[in-house]
Image (cartoon, helix red, strand yellow):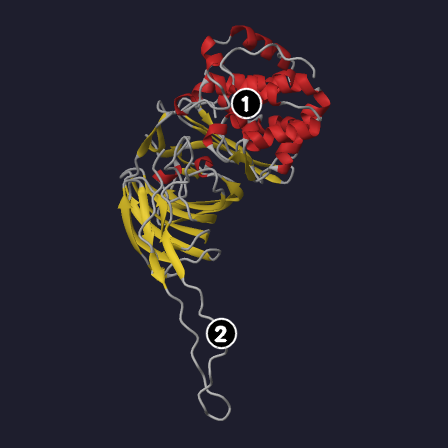
């Protein structure tokens, strides 16, 4: 990105005792004696799933006790009334014996809930939807929850970036934000550690476009409404989902057998924004040469114009950009940044928010590599300028552990990028680019942590790198200039 929520708790246990084996009759009609080896079915204790995954920065984000495989989100939005009606189906597996489980849902009124087709009771605790199935969910078993809801969606006051989530606009809506946003328009396990596939069916008045993630599935109109379908089959962190509704200049095509779908709001004149987004596949092809195969099944970008959005976000397969990035002319640097996130941040996602530099450091360094590729400046020049000129606060803020208030600070971006250049200098180009490609390949579609990256860098380079990473990621003083180890 260029640019939370709750705590752990356990509900009262529900003890369910298994039925004892019943005695039968032998072939003579005489009641059979129980076998000496027979034993009762073990009892199960069902407990409430945690209302948070326990992230050190955002303890209440997400929920515990289950893993989601797929969301199917069907929503109808009427901009004239600012009214949303939706049904979300959650396919998941229990990771504990659950008496209840939570989903994150900010605002909106839940009208019905079923679990495995049976009605389930539900309650609300602020932005938590607490669901109690008719019977306990058994650890290891899959289940399907369906939630119907409606209301006027509202944004969330994010702890780091201001308003995020569902924003009503002059001609539609924008659902966008980091570190949280999805829970403002559908029930979700809202933490990047629980990635899932997504299907979206978004119905809007005729004449409006509804853009989301992944492969476009076409559109169909009936009775004054148009339904747009989208499918992201690669695992996606919830904050990377998006919904943008409005009037756009749409560009479609195909590249390397994948669909390309881009949209630029008609609220900005045709020009620099359109030109920049048209470079998406060109930039992606260059990054593919550096990072390895492009990780998703679609390409694209969306440009929006709203005073509340002054950032760009790496929404999976189709980044969203504020129009302000293109006011001074074409800008492929920001395109390179957000596309780099498709590898680092999207495909390789965060296991915990503390490791945000793994997203932003890589995306920042990708900007420098792209500038070098286009003969604007070299990565070394970018490093040298920042090493000499960044504010002192950058050196006081460790990008590997920035704290909640500095989560999207200059240190995370600039010092994060400088850390990668320091690594490149230390291990040499051959080892460095092998590290980068291997990281993207081995962690593809998963989540990752800083210690895992350090271990990989040491394995491939054959060098001990603790001192380098301690200085660049965790130190509070300006490190020495990097040198070859």
Residue placed furthest toward the right = 430
Task: Give the crowd class for mark 2: few <14, some 14-19, many >=20 residues within 10 Å.
Answer: few
- Mark identifier at residue 106: none
Q: Secondary structure at mark 1?
A: helix
Q: Residue 150's x, y, as percent?
A: 29, 46
The Cα–Cα distance between marks 2 and 1, rounded to whole angstroms, is 60 Å
Q: Quadrant of residue 279?
A: top right
- Does residue 316 appear left or right of residue 423 in this picture? left
Mark 2 near mark 1, Cβ–Cβ under 8 Å?
no
**Above or below: residue 15 compared with residue 485:** below
Q: Nearer the viewer, residue 63 or 15?
A: 15
**Above or below: residue 94 compared with residue 320:** below
Q: Nearer the viewer, residue 71 or 260?
A: 71
Q: Residue 356's x, y, as percent?
A: 49, 27
- Does residue 390 appear left or right of residue 117 in this picture? right
Q: Residue 64's x, y, as percent?
A: 41, 45
Query: Earlier along the polypeptide chain: callout 2 or callout 1?
Result: 2
Residue 267 in sight: yes
**In the image, which is nearer the foreground, mark 2 or mark 1?**
2
Q: Secondary structure at mark 2?
A: loop
Q: Residue 172's x, y, as percent?
A: 35, 34
- Does residue 120 appear left or right of residue 96 in this picture? left
Residue placed furthest toward the bottom = 28
Judging by the rendered image, the residue that carries numbered circle 2 is: 38
Quarter of the picture containing the C terminus is top right
Residue placed furthest toward the top = 388
The count of marks equals 2
Judging by the rendered image, the residue that carries numbered circle 1 is: 361
Tell me which residue sits at (40%, 67%) in the image.
18
């Amino acid at each position: 990105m260029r640019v939370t929520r709750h705590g752990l708790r356990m509900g009262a246990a529900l003890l369910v005792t298994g039925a004892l084996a019943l005695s039968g009759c032998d072939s003579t009609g005489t009641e059979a004696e129980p076998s000496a080896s027979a034993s009762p079915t073990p009892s199960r204790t069902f407990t409430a799933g945690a209302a948070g995954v326990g992230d050190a920065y955002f303890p209440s984000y997400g929920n515990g006790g289950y893993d989601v495989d797929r969301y199917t989100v069907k929503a109808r939005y009427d901009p004239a009334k600012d009214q949303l009606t939706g049904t979300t189906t959650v396919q998941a597996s229990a990771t504990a014996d659950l008496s209840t489980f939570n989903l994150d849902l900010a605002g909106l009124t839940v009208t019905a809930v079923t679990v495995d087709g049976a009605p389930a009771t539900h309650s609300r605790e602020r932005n938590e939807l607490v669901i109690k199935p008719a019977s306990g969910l058994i650890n290891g078993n899959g289940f399907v929850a369906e939630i119907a809801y409606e209301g006027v969606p509202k944004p969330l006051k994010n702890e780091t970036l201001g308003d995020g989530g569902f924003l009503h606009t002059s001609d539609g809506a924008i659902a966008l934000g980091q570190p949280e946003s999805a829970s403002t328009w559908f029930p979700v396990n809202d933490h990047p550690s629980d990635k899932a596939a997504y299907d979206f069916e978004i119905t809007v008045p005729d004449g409006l476009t509804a853009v989301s993630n992944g492969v476009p599935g076409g559109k169909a109109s009936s009775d004054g409404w148009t339904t747009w379908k989208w499918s992201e089959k690669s695992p996606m962190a919830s904050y990377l989902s998006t919904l943008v509704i409005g009037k756009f200049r749409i560009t479609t095509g195909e590249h390397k057998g994948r669909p390309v779908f881009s949209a630029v709001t008609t609220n900005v004149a045709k020009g620099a924004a359109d030109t920049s987004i048209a470079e998406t596949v060109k930039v992606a092809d260059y990054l593919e040469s550096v990072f390895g195969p492009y990780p998703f099944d679609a390409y694209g970008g969306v440009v929006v114009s709203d005073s509340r959005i002054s950032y760009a976000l790496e929404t999976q397969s189709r980044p969203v950009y504020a129009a302000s990035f293109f006011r001074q002319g074409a800008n492929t640097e920001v395109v390179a940044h957000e596309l780099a996130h498709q590898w680092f941040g999207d495909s390789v996602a965060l296991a915990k928010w503390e490791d945000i530099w793994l997203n932003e450091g890589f995306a920042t360094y990708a900007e420098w590599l792209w500038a070098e590729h286009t003969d604007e400046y070299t990565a070394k020049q970018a490093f040298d300028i920042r090493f000499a000129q960044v504010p002192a606060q950058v050196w006081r803020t460790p990008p590997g552990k920035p704290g909640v208030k500095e989560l999207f600070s200059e240190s995370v971006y600039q010092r994060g990028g400088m850390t990668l250049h320091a690594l490149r200098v230390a291990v040499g180009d051959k080892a460095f680019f092998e590290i980068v490609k291997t990281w993207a390949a081995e962690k593809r579609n998963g989540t990752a942590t800083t210690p895992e990256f350090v271990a990989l860098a040491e394995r491939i380079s054959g060098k001990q790198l603790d001192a380098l990473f301690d200085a660049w990621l965790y130190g509070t003083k300006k490190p020495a200039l990097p040198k070859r180890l």
